[in-house]
Image (cartoon, rainbow, N blue to C red):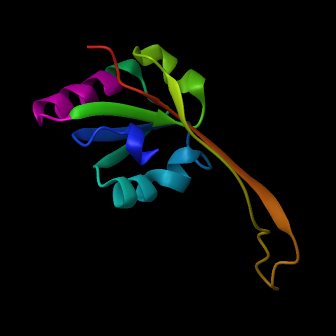
Amino acid sequence: MCAAIPRDASVVFIDSGSGGAADRLTQVVRGMCDVPVARLDHARLTAVQQVVRGIEHAARRPVFLAGVRSRLVPYGGQVRLVMRLRSTMDENALTAPPLHTLPFNVNVWMSEPAP
């Protein structure tokens, strides 16, 4: 995923709120890919346009990421799959050690908005 993100990018996760790719990956992208990262939940087109202008004003390249392809389509640009993780995680057991693993699957789609 980091290889797909340009070095001069500022990444914005377009998300629907709790539990999405932004919850899992915002800090990962910031720390491992070494680019600024923000998130917009339930993004409206005017808010997205304002964020893009701010990124461009800072002489950086806006890049959008989302866990679902359809969230990126309204903002233009080619949408492509940049990460498809298939793994497992411990079950969420708060009062005892976990006894089982659960599927942990994450897709990350990327686009660069059309000017």
Above or below, comparing residue 75 to residue 107 in the picture: above
58 within the magenta span:
yes
Q: Residue at x 59, y 48 (%)?
A: 18
Instruction: Please state if 36 lies on the left or on the right of 43 as rendered.
Output: left
- The answer to whether residue 91 is left or right of residue 46 is right
Q: Quadrant of the C terminus?
A: top left
Q: Is residue 35 magenta?
A: no
Q: Is residue 99 visible?
A: yes
Residue nearer the viewer, 85 or 48: 85
Taking the view exactly as shown, the residue that stands out farthest to the right is 99
For residue 112, side relative to residue 109 (left or right): left
Q: What is the quadrant of residue 111 in the picture?
A: top left
Residue name at image x 56 percent, y 46 percent: 21
Q: Which residues are magenta?
A: 47-60
Q: Is residue 62 above or below residue 85?
A: above
Q: In the image, what residue occupies the spot 76% across and 70% down?
A: 92
The residue most toward the bottom is 96
- 96 is higher (above) or lower (below) than 58: below
Dominant secondary structure (helix, strand or loop) of the stretch shown in magenta: helix
Image location (x, y in percent) of residue 71: 54, 25
Q: Position of residue 19 (x, y in %)?
A: 62, 49
Q: Is residue 38 left or right of residue 108?
A: left
Q: Position of residue 47 (x, y in %)?
A: 33, 27
Picture mark count: 0
Q: Nearer the viewer, residue 49 or 83?
A: 83
Say if residue 41 shows up in the picture: no
Rendered residue at 32%/14% (across/down): 114
Residue 83 lies, in percent from the top left, at 56, 41
